[in-house]
Structure formats: structure tokens, C-alpha cells
Image: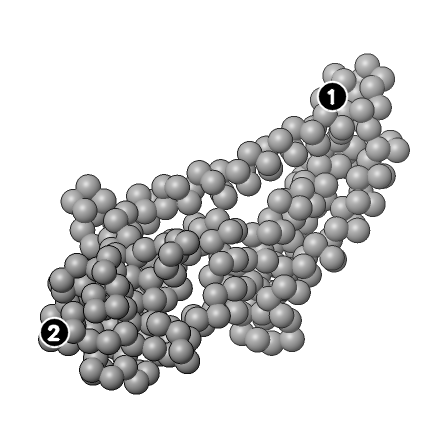
């Protein structure tokens, strides 16, 4: 860089290819974060030997507000979209079903043209004689489907209609943070399950991550390109100060949004960009004019 500047090349011409490289790196980082990492999330969140031994993972009991069903079980097998020993507690009135459905396994079934999404329970032990029970309804919509009303079910099977997929039941915060933006958006928009403010904040933060990364580069890169007569330690101090300011704003805004104080989740993600974005643009223009 010193040799280029000594040959008479303007700072702006040096800055432009560096920014192009930065954009390429940020784009590659975003692709890895949204496509590559979610594909290997099960492996990355498993304990040593857990993935190889195919052990069931812990699950988080979740309540479906639209149907009044609490989904529980002994463990999850995300790779097979399966719940081991599921127990579905029924808080709505389903004549003949009692207050719980116990089964050997439950496999998540995505929605198709002929039926909604839900869990296919196999080996139902409670209630007894589930094949002879009539369909369970909530506000006229089928929720508990049995063999009596659906010939595609086998003996001892029951289909529970819900939008709470396997990802909602994961008892692992790391798994949630490794999810892609489309999955986070689906969870936030799912009206059948409660979405915390932390999840809303995480979604907005992920959407704004690339422009925020670029903003941080614009704040710090002019220190390298146009150092002037500043001493090395002065430049290092300014760079550290910029980074501390950037992450302090992000941390404080996220904490305020997560606790419901002053800021909404969306505003918490935008605060660092709104405050530092104009400053970053001014520093970029100043570096170009040198």
C-alpha cells in the first residue's frame, strides 16, 4: 500500500478495489451463514459421539395455541424428523380422546395438496381403540385424524394437524442461531406458537448483518488507506474505539429489545445502522477525495 501511494496513485483508487473485495467476502460469508451452516446444523450442534451414535436429542415442549395441544416426548431425531415416545396433551375438547395421546413415535409430515402439515403418530397406546374414534375438530377444522375418517392411515395410527415442526421443538439455542433467515421468518410468522422478542431481534439482526458488516469496514478502512501523519498506535487506538462503539451499540440495543425496554426488535437491529451508517458514508467520501 505504501509503494502504491508513493507512486502517485490516489487514495480513492486504492480504496475502490479493496471495497470490491470486501463486498465479495461479505457476500460469501452471508451465503455460508444462510445456506451452508444450516445444512450442517445437526452435526454442529451435536455433542461428540452423539451424531455418530444416532442418539435422540433433547426436545422443548411446545404448545400449539390454535389447537390447544402441548407437544412433548422423550427426545428428537431431527435427521428423521421424528419424536421418540411422544405425548400430546390435549387441552381442547376432543370427545373420546381424553386428555392425552401416547404413541411409539411421531414423524413430521409437511403439508401437501391433499392434507395439512402435522405429525403422524404410530403405535398409539392411548387412547385405546383409536382407530374407532371420530375425527377431533377445533372450530370446525380437523385436528385429530383417525383411520375411521382417513383410509390412508394404518391400524394404530393417528394424524395430528399442527404447524409446529421439528425445528420449533429443538431444545438448543445454538441450533436456533444457526438457522437461516427463511426458517426464522417462518417461526416468527407462525401464529400457533409463541415467538420471543429475542427471536424477533435475531431475525432483524440477521437481515441487517451484511450492511452492518460493510458499515464497519467503511468506518475502519479509511484509517488504513489515509493514515496521514498519525502514529501507528494512534491509528490502532481509533480502530479499537470504532469497534467497541459498534458492538456496544449492537449489544445495548439487542438487550433493550429483548427485555421490552424502549426499543422494538426491529428498531434494535436498525439503531447501529442508523447511527453509524451516515458516519461511515462520510468517512468513505472523505477517503475518496484524498
| Residue 280: mark | none
Judge whether residue 27 can be spotted in this image. yes
- The residue drawn where x is 60% and y is 37% is 26
Depth check, front residue: 38 or 152: 152
Quadrant in the picture for residue 82 = bottom left
Q: Tell me if residue 96 comes above or below residue 115 in the rendering.
A: below
Q: Tell me if residue 142 comes above or below residue 151 in the rendering.
A: below
- The residue drawn where x is 65% and y is 75% is 262
Q: Position of residue 78 (x, y in %)?
A: 29, 52
Mark 2 or 1: in front is: 2
The 10 Å Cα crowd at callout 2, few under 14, some 14 to 19, many 20 or more, is few
Q: Disc 2 marks which residue?
A: 129
Q: Position of residue 128 (x, y in %)?
A: 11, 75
Q: Position of residue 151 (x, y in %)?
A: 23, 60
- The residue drawn where x is 43% and y is 70% is 193
Q: Disc 1 marks which residue?
A: 2
Q: Quadrant of the C terminus?
A: top right
Give the secondary structure at mark 1.
helix
Amino acid at each position: 500500500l505504501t509503494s502504491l501511494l508513493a507512486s502517485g496513485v490516489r487514495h480513492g483508487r486504492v480504496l475502490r478495489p479493496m471495497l470490491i473485495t470486501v463486498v465479495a467476502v461479505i457476500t460469501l460469508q452471508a451465503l455460508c451463514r444462510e445456506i451452508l451452516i444450516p445444512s450442517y446444523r445437526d452435526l454442529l450442534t451435536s455433542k461428540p459421539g452423539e451424531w455418530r451414535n444416532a442418539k435422540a436429542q433433547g426436545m422443548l415442549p411446545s404448545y400449539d395455541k390454535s389447537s390447544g395441544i402441548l407437544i412433548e416426548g422423550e427426545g428428537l431425531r431431527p435427521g428423521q424428523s421424528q419424536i421418540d415416545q411422544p405425548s400430546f396433551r390435549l387441552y381442547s375438547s376432543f370427545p373420546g380422546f381424553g386428555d392425552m395421546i401416547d404413541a411409539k413415535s411421531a414423524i413430521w409430515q409437511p403439508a401437501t395438496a391433499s392434507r395439512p402439515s402435522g405429525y403422524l403418530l404410530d403405535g398409539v397406546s392411548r387412547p385405546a381403540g383409536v382407530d374407532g374414534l371420530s375425527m377431533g375438530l377445533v372450530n370446525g377444522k380437523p385436528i385429530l385424524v383417525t383411520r375411521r375418517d382417513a383410509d390412508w392411515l394404518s391400524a394404530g395410527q393417528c394424524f395430528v394437524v399442527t404447524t409446529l415442526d421439528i425445528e420449533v421443538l429443538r431444545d438448543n439455542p445454538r441450533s436456533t442461531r444457526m438457522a437461516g433467515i427463511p426458517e426464522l421468518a417462518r417461526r416468527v410468522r407462525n401464529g400457533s406458537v409463541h415467538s420471543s422478542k429475542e427471536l424477533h431481534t435475531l431475525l432483524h439482526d440477521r437481515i441487517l448483518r451484511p450492511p452492518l458488516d460493510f458499515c464497519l469496514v467503511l468506518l475502519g478502512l479509511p484509517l488504513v488507506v489515509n493514515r496521514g501523519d498519525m502514529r501507528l498506535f494512534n491509528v490502532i487506538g481509533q480502530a479499537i474505539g470504532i469497534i467497541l462503539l459498534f458492538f456496544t451499540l449492537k449489544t445495548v440495543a439487542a438487550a433493550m429489545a429483548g427485555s421490552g425496554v424502549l426499543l422494538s426488535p426491529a428498531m434494535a437491529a436498525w439503531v447501529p445502522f442508523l447511527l453509524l451508517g451516515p458516519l461511515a458514508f462520510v468517512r468513505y467520501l472523505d477517503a475518496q477525495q484524498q
